[in-house]
Image (cartoon, rainbow, N blue to C red):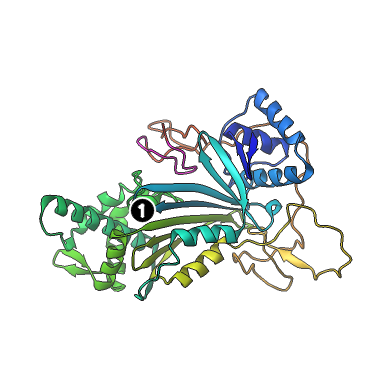
């Protein structure tokens, strides 16, 4: 474990040892690897932490607390054309204040750094090529989640048919057989970031391949027809003009961003929101999935910036460094959201950022001061011993399938 510039660089075992040494327990949203450090690793990590300055140790402890027990966690993937993909983890804890812990895997070790929402927004807007203008082609609709994911599968099917037609020197098909769509969706866990369906699947809380598409197919098709994205063509279906606009944008995409955030309310219920942004030379398309509802839209760059600002925003919570003493007048008491850390007025009923019902505390809980407990890794997810999926060698998470090339949790390549 050491610092390389502003990055804390460590192995998975070193991060687990550090979380125990600072007294931070594993949370239900923990992003720590599931490994057990050796006594030698624990001794080396303790020596590293002890030699840090108070300010650097506070920052280090905050980042480790964020990945061990985040109040809000995110998964961020983005591509640059069809040649490069970047995968990272975002985690927030009250101890990191108004900043995210940005975590990625490279060269056998994890890199952690603190980034503000503004830093992340600037990177994502560069990926979406904010400086290049878009044409105006407004389209917005609300769909069932299964309908929007099926539409992504339809675009995948037509793109594959188009490429096959090019190789065979024949015209590309304009219609599609709905009977083959369940097979398309059941391949959603395939590792290939060049295809939007496979790319988006890696940030969803559950892979599209396990959804009951035999039952979901008919109502999802009807939903897409009702929203003028597809229309019947005899026994088949074909895209409408609105649907074709999305197909053209996805076919000629320049960059893609997939982002998911997970939070937990006071009742320990997890809430997920996942978005897919696809930038083509002339359009920017959005697929936004949250629970059973989703949205499909063509966005302006200003709309995209506003959307990402809202998603990346976090409350100020506890600063990493202790503030200097001041004689200023005390500020009015405020509530603190237990999920996202936002500070808001005492008379508000819900958190204005994430919608969690207001709680009774008027300040964030202090950092834990208990002595480190016995070091135990969190229990792995329950899987059947028969045909159980292999585990990622870096973080211990079960892989989507035996042929996976990347871990869907940490993004590490599977050797």
Residue 282 visible in the current orientation: yes
Label total for image: 1
Query: In front: 406, or 349?
Result: 406
Q: Residue furthest right?
A: 327
Q: Is residue 144 left or right of residue 4?
A: left
Give residue 135's position: percent from left, percent from top.
35, 74
Report helix, strand or loop for mark 1.
Answer: loop
Nearer to the camera, 36 or 265:
36
Residue 139 located within the stretch drawn in magenta: no
For the record, the magenta segment spans: 402-413
Task: Identify the residue position indicated by label 1 in the image.
Answer: 81
Q: Nearer the viewer, residue 99 or 396?
A: 99
Asked if the magenta segment contains residue 411, the reply would be yes
In the picture, which quadrant includes the N terminus? top right
Give residue 263's position: percent from left, percent from top.
Answer: 57, 55
Looking at the picture, does residue 106 appear above or below residue 118?
above
* 364 or 144, nearer to the observer: 364
Q: Is residue 89 left or right of residue 19?
A: left
């Amino acid at each position: 474990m050491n610092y390389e510039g502003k990055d804390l660089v460590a192995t998975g075992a070193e991060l687990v040892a550090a979380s125990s040494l600072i007294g931070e327990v594993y949370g239900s949203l923990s992003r720590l690897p599931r490994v057990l450090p050796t006594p030698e690793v624990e001794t080396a990590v303790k020596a590293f932490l002890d030699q840090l300055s108070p300010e650097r140790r506070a920052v280090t402890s905050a980042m480790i607390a964020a990945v061990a027990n985040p109040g809000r966690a995110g998964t961020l993937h983005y591509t640059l054309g069809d040649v490069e993909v970047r995968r990272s983890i975002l985690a927030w804890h009250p101890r990191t204040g108004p900043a995210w812990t940005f975590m990625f895997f490279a060269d056998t070790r994890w890199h952690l750094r603190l980034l503000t929402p503004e830093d992340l927004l600037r990177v994502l807007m560069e990926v979406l090529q904010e400086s290049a203008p878009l044409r105006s082609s407004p389209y917005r609709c609300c769909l069932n989640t299964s309908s929007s994911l099926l539409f992504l599968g339809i675009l995948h099917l037509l793109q594959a048919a188009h490429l096959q037609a090019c190789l065979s020197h024949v015209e590309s098909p304009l219609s599609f057989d709905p009977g083959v769509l369940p097979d398309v969706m059941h391949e959603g866990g395939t590792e290939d970031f060049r295809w939007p369906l496979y790319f988006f699947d890696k940030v969803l809380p559950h892979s599209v391949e396990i959804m009951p598409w035999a039952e979901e197919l008919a109502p999802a098709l009807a939903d897409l027809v009702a929203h003028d994205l597809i229309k019947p063509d005899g026994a088949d279906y074909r895209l409408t003009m609105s649907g074709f606009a999305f197909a053209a944008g996805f076919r000629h995409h320049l960059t893609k961003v997939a982002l998911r955030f997970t939070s937990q309310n006071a009742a320990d219920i997890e809430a997920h929101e996942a978005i897919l942004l696809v930038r083509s030379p002339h359009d920017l398309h959005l697929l936004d999935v949250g629970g059973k509802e989703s949205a499909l839209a063509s966005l302006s760059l200003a709309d995209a910036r506003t959307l990402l600002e809202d998603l990346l925003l976090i409350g100020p919570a506890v600063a990493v460094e202790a503030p200097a003493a001041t004689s200023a007048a005390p500020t009015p008491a405020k509530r603190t959201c237990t999920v996202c850390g936002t500070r808001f007025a005492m008379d508000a009923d819900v958190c204005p950022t994430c919608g969690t019902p207001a709680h009774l505390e008027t300040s964030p809980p202090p950092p834990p001061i208990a002595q480190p407990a016995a070091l135990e890794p969190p229990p792995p997810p329950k899987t059947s011993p028969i045909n159980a999926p292999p585990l990622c060698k870096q973080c211990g998470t079960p892989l989507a399938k035996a042929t996976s090339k990347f871990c869907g949790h940490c993004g590490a390549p599977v050797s």
